[in-house]
Image: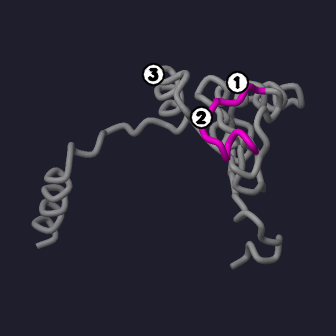
Amino acid sequence: MADAKENDVLHLSEVQGEPWPQQIPTLWESFIESATRNLDAPAMSSVYQHGEHYGLPNLPLDDAEYRSQPYLRWSYREFTTAVARSAEGLRQQGLSEGSVIFTFVPNCAEFSVASILRFSSISFALKSLIGLLDSEH
């Protein structure tokens, strides 16, 4: 009976798409693949952070509200640069690939960058605009 149920589950998953891959790419591998194919495409936006964050150029947007108050919009090119700069800063502090780091930041550009780093990172995102004690809920 257990075998029949297991086969049914496998069969149902294949109805919806391709079989599950034997080896799932890491977050880093998926990011690099997307960045390589879409270097100038939008990669991330953060409406609570000012454009040209960290001196990186902002991806333009033809929108009146955006022009009056630009917010962070990075292409994969800028996002990749932010990841590389962050990784280099951590290397200069003595960390290397495989080092464990813990990030505790709001849902912002820094959270996304920290999540992509090629370190053994544990990222915990705070909800925007909540206090530290509220994050326990």
Residue 116, percent from left and from top: 63, 38
Residue type, numbered disc 1: Thr
Query: Of the numbered discs in the image, which one, if any, rests on residue 81?
Result: 1
- Compared to residue 128, the image places residue 112 above or below, namely above
Judged from this view, the residue extending furthest toward the right is 93
- Pick whichever, 135 or 98, lies toward us: 135
Q: Distance between the Cα atoms at labels 2 and 1?
A: 24 Å
Where residue 21 sits, quadrant-wise, is: top left
Where residue 10 sits, quadrant-wise, is: bottom left
Q: Name the residue under label 3.
A: 37
Q: Mark 2 points at which residue?
A: 62
Single out the mark in the foreground, 2 or 3: 2
User: Helix, strand, or loop for circle 1?
Assistant: helix
Residue 128, percent from left and from top: 73, 63
Residue 17, percent from left and from top: 20, 47
Q: CB atoms at circles 2 and 3 under 8 Å apart?
A: no
Q: Main secondary structure of the magenta part?
A: loop
The stretch of residues the image draws in magenta is 56-68
Q: In this view, does 127 lie to the left or right of 18?
A: right
**Residue occupying image coordinates x 18% and y 62%:** 9
Residue 2, percent from left and from top: 16, 70
- Pick whichever, 84 or 24, lies toward us: 84
**Residue occupying image coordinates x 83% and y 70%:** 132
Magenta highlight on residue 69: no
